[in-house]
Amino acid sequence: MTRQRLGRAFVFLAGSVVGGLALAFVIVFLRPDLLRVPTPAAATPAVAAPATSTPQVEAAPVSYADAVARAAPAVANIYSERLVKERLPPATLGELFGDAMPRYRQRIEQTLGSGVVVDADGHIVTNHHVIDDAERVSVQLADGRQAEAHVVGRDPDTDLAVLRVGLDHMPVMPLGRSDRLRVGDVVLAIGNPVGLSQSVTQGIVSGTGRGQLGVATFENFIQTDAPINFGNSGGALVNSNGELVGINTAVLAKNLGIEGIGFAIPVNLVRGVMQEILAHGRVIRGSIGVVLGEVNGVEARALDLPRAGVVITNLIPGSPAVDAGLRPGDIVVTVGGNAVHGQQDALTRIAASKPGDTLEIGLVRGAREVKVPVRVTERRTS
């Protein structure tokens, strides 16, 4: 009896084991991933990140809306009107062949531009070429208010002008530092291109210290690929914080199909010009009456000059340079004891001197170097 019970228990146990194994086989067949054993975190050896000397670069902001909101209200539209005289086409055979006096008519030409409100007194900075020869200048603010503008002063040598409007509660542009700009910094151009007020375009600083473009006498432009179009002249170039870093001025050879090369006057230069205009109505600069140019080695040999560099190409009659004995062909090497690095540098150093001072000019003349004291007068602009 006992043996029979043990036999039945063994058979039951064996059946249970076989059934369990069969069930496990079916489960593993259907879910093989259950056999994967996760690796404990502690079992994974810690590997130190390789050292790197690459500087950390902050991610650019997703949007520049805050910068635009801070700067755009202080960007104004400038409308100027000038009287233009034009010749009418010949109406008779006498006019066609020169037997009669030609006829002319006058018309009002309107031009578009932009400007930047720089203080709470209503002073607006724009380009000189925007208001040059204008009979009437009017301003429209971003909030829609309009007023006729008074020209406080102008400086053709830097293509800047200062206007003033008599409106209350003017929005003011925060001024930045153009000397802190780096190539690659994001900038925004805000202005009134083709009459589309408060238009914003975005790009980067492509270069700094650009000169010899023929736009102005004293050139130290910021180059940018932020699109600048007709009507943007005088508008704001701002950084990603919404601070003014330049006044948009020119586009390079757009008629030749060149895109993405625009120029702005640095705000540090704008500050100085604005302060001079507000104080004196003009910018007071020094002059000695020389016309300067640059020659390379080949040109120097062809012109029989002692060396390449900054050369005096002409003298203004009756100027201090003539009185001091300077001559065309003299090579200018120092101004006021400082070595010059190009024609623009020499011209800027002379302009920075005060009328009435005596400025020492270091020259190479033939085989010898000479230093000539020259009296400084005020530079006249057209």
Image: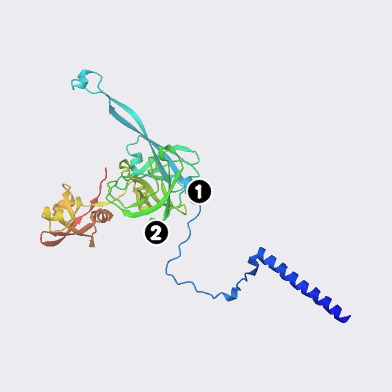
- Establish if 51 lies above or below 269: below
Q: Which three-letter amino acid code belongs to the residue tagged 1? A: Ala
Q: Can residue 354 be seen?
A: no
Q: Mark 2 = which residue?
A: 180
> Residue visible at 33% across and 39% down?
132
Q: Position of residue 364 (x, y in %)?
A: 14, 60
Q: Mark 1 = which residue?
A: 69
Q: Position of residue 12 (x, y in %)?
A: 81, 73
For label 2, the SS is helix
- The label on residue 277 is none
Q: In the depicted view, which residue is nearer to us: 71 or 228?
A: 228
| The quarter of the displayed image where residue 343 is located | bottom left
Quadrant placement of the N terminus: bottom right
> Residue visible at 72% across and 68% down?
22
Q: Is residue 371 left or right of residue 191?
A: left
> Residue visible at 58% across and 76% down?
43
Q: Position of residue 196 (x, y in %)?
A: 44, 39
For label 1, the SS is helix
> Residue visible at 18% across and 49% down?
319
Q: Can residue 307 be seen?
A: yes
As drawn, which residue projects farthest toward the bottom?
2
Q: Position of residue 356 (x, y in %)?
A: 24, 54
Specify few, some or many for label 1: CA neighbours under 10 Å numbering under 14, 14-19, or 20 or more.
Answer: few
- Establish if 80 lies above or below 278: above
